[in-house]
Amino acid sequence: MANERQFSAVQSGLIERYRTWLPIESGDPVVSLGEGSTPLVQAPVLSARFDCEVWIKVEGANPTGSFKDRGMTMAVSKAKAEGAQAVVCASTGNTSASAAAYAVRAGMKPIVLLPQGKIAKGKLAQAIVYGAQIVQVDGNFDECLTVARKLAEAYPVALVNSVNPFRLEGQKTAAFEIVDALGDAPDLHVMPIGNAGNMPAYWRGFKQYADAGKATKRPRMWAVQAEGAAPLVLGHPVLNPETIATAIRIGNPASADLANAARDESGGQFTAVSDEQILAAQRFLAAHEGIFVEPASASGIAALLAAHAAGELESGQRITITVTGNGLKDIDTALSGIDIRTEVVAPEAMAVADAIGLA
Ligand code: F0G
């Protein structure tokens, strides 16, 4: 009991909420920061524009600001149960932030491999402040992951990338939450995809709930990449992936087979959007729906806006969109190309009214 208290949070996390659906044993420690139970927010402006019922699953509301916490509570709890002293991961930023937080929470040492210069500053700050041992690698994410796998084979460190099967088990709970909130599965679920763990995790969640009679249907799964890093759309790896959406700057997704199966079984699709479309969607979502997400997270919105503009989005659907990470993680990209007003006025109502055109 004392041991359990040591790891618990006031808001119990997703392991407690969905324990019977997860491969967690009664004696396993639960390493939690109160993750999950994130807001599912109605999107009135998108709903009106698409003539659909649109809901946004705001995963940036997790403890470290991204959906990775769902997988990490499971992976780190299991690593702790197995007696691991250290965890290792390759990351485009969010996995490293999450791994670092959950590892220190469990009294373990976090080691993170990052593609040098390609990590949003907020995520790097997280890894630093959580106290991770950071190794910047002169290579991209795919190369980092290859090295992380080899380290975990050769040394006593637990790999907590999404190739760790417990990660996807934790992440499937987001699909449970959507069905629990709406009373059924949506017609269509849209989300970004990078290393391809999260989309099959959702598919598993939707399938398990439908099989158990908790939903009457399963959604079509639509996963979105950036044009410069679109191996799943192209059907082959991309050697030098490039996009401003650094979270999904991935050329050789580790779980491509699972993602292809999820697309096929669900009757879904992979599409790609340009960096410009991603930035426009990021601003649209913030300015119209009040939700500020990081660039990668806006790719699903971008794809829907593009499909609607092309007359390819069927009306009358119930659509859920996962936005995967918080906008504050990458303010450099959010502010790029924006002329920030530098005018300074006197602390007087008249002066301010004048400056904003009220006077
Ligand atoms: N959105 C964000 C914000 C991400 O950080 C990631 C992946 C994805 C979407 C794609 O999810 O890889 O399961 O298909 N980020 C990983 C990381 C690669 O290292 O943080 P996926």
Image (cartoon, rainbow, N blue to C red):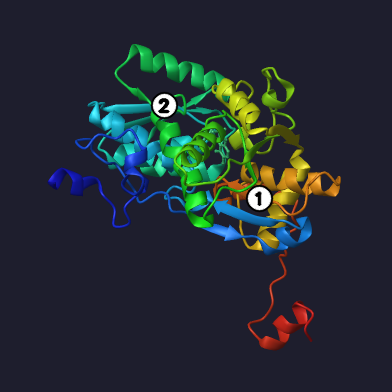
Few, some or many residues within 10 Å of mark 1 (<14, 14–19, 20+): many
Write the residue at 39% across / 49% down.
35
Please name the residue that numbered disc 1 is placed on: 319
Q: Which amino acid does label 2 sit on?
A: Pro
Where is residue 254 shown, x and y percent of the image?
54, 21
Where is residue 292 shown, x and y percent of the image?
61, 56
Drawn side of residue 149 relative to residue 288, left or right: left
Q: Does the residue labelled 2 lie within 8 Å of ligand 1?
A: no
Write the residue at 13% across / 46% down.
1
Kindly indicate the quadrant of the structure image that contains residue 109.
Answer: top left
Please name the residue that numbered disc 2 is placed on: 165
Res 270 seen here: yes
Where is residue 3 shown, x and y percent of the image?
16, 43
Q: Nearer the viewer, residue 1 or 262?
A: 262
Drawn side of residue 80 relative to residue 161, left or right: left
Write the residue at 48% across / 38% down.
205
Write the residue at 35% across / 11% down.
154
Say if 257 sits above or below 76 in the image.
Answer: above
Q: Which of 142 and 317 is in front in this view?
A: 317
Say if 10 sits above or below 154 in the image.
Answer: below
Drawn side of residue 104 relative to residue 209, left or right: left
Kindly indicate the quadrant of the structure image that contains residue 355.
Answer: bottom right
User: In the rendered view of the protein, which quadrant contains the C terminus?
Assistant: bottom right
Disc 1 is placed on an element classified as strand
Disc 2 is placed on an element classified as helix
Q: Which of 37 and 302 is in front in this view?
A: 37
